[in-house]
Image (tube, rainbow, N blue to C red):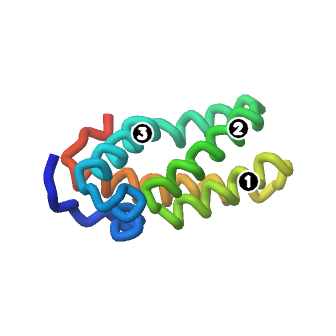
């Protein structure tokens, strides 16, 4: 793992490094783990919504919200929070909020993939 972190769109690296006790190797590992965990997440949430399983979709949005906070991806965290709330409350704006979440997750994941030369499957 490298010492210098690449530019990662949508991620506050200074905050993320502080969360990881200023250990770039630990932060890189957490970012790579995030990527592995969430690489298929939008498809899984979309499938849950399409199948009427809003509880599962809400849980996935909740997990994304928490782990986005861990890596300091604030806009993604907020998009996941809004999606989670809309799914829980049966809010008809959930489709728009899902699109916003998907866009922000794709931005963060694309940055991680490019920054660490990962294959997006």
Residue 47: x %, y % from top left: 63, 32
Could you tell me how far apart the alpha carbons at marks 1 and 2 are, in whole angstroms? 10 Å
Compare marks 2 and 3 and give the one earlier in the sequence.
3
Crowd around label 3: few <14 · some 14–19 · many ≥20 (10 Å) = some
Instruction: Give the labeled residue for mark 1.
Output: 94
Would you place residue 121 above or below residue 72 in this image? above
Instruction: Give the labeled residue for mark 3.
Output: 39
Compare marks 1 and 2 and give the one earlier in the sequence.
2
Q: Is residue 50 left or right of residue 121?
A: right
Q: Is residue 33 left or right of residue 90?
A: left
| Residue visible at 45% across and 61% down in the picture | 72
Could you tell me how far apart the alpha carbons at marks 1 and 3 are, in whole angstroms? 21 Å
Residue contact at pointers 1 and 2, CB within 8 angstroms: yes
| Residue visible at 53% across and 37% down in the picture | 43
Instruction: Give the labeled residue for mark 2.
Output: 49
Residue 62: x %, y % from top left: 65, 46
């Amino acid at each position: 793992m490298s010492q210098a972190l690449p530019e990662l769109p949508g991620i506050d690296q200074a905050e993320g490094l502080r969360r990881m006790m200023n250990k770039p190797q630990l932060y890189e590992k957490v970012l790579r783990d995030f990527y592995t965990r969430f690489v298929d997440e939008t498809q899984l949430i979309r499938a849950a919504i399409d199948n009427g399983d809003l509880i599962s979709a809400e849980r996935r949005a909740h997990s994304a919200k928490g782990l986005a906070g861990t890596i300091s991806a604030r806009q993604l965290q907020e998009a996941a929070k809004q999606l989670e709330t809309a799914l829980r409350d049966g809010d008809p704006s959930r489709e728009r909020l899902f699109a916003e979440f998907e866009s922000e997750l794709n931005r963060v994941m694309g940055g991680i993939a490019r920054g660490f030369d990962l294959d997006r499957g």
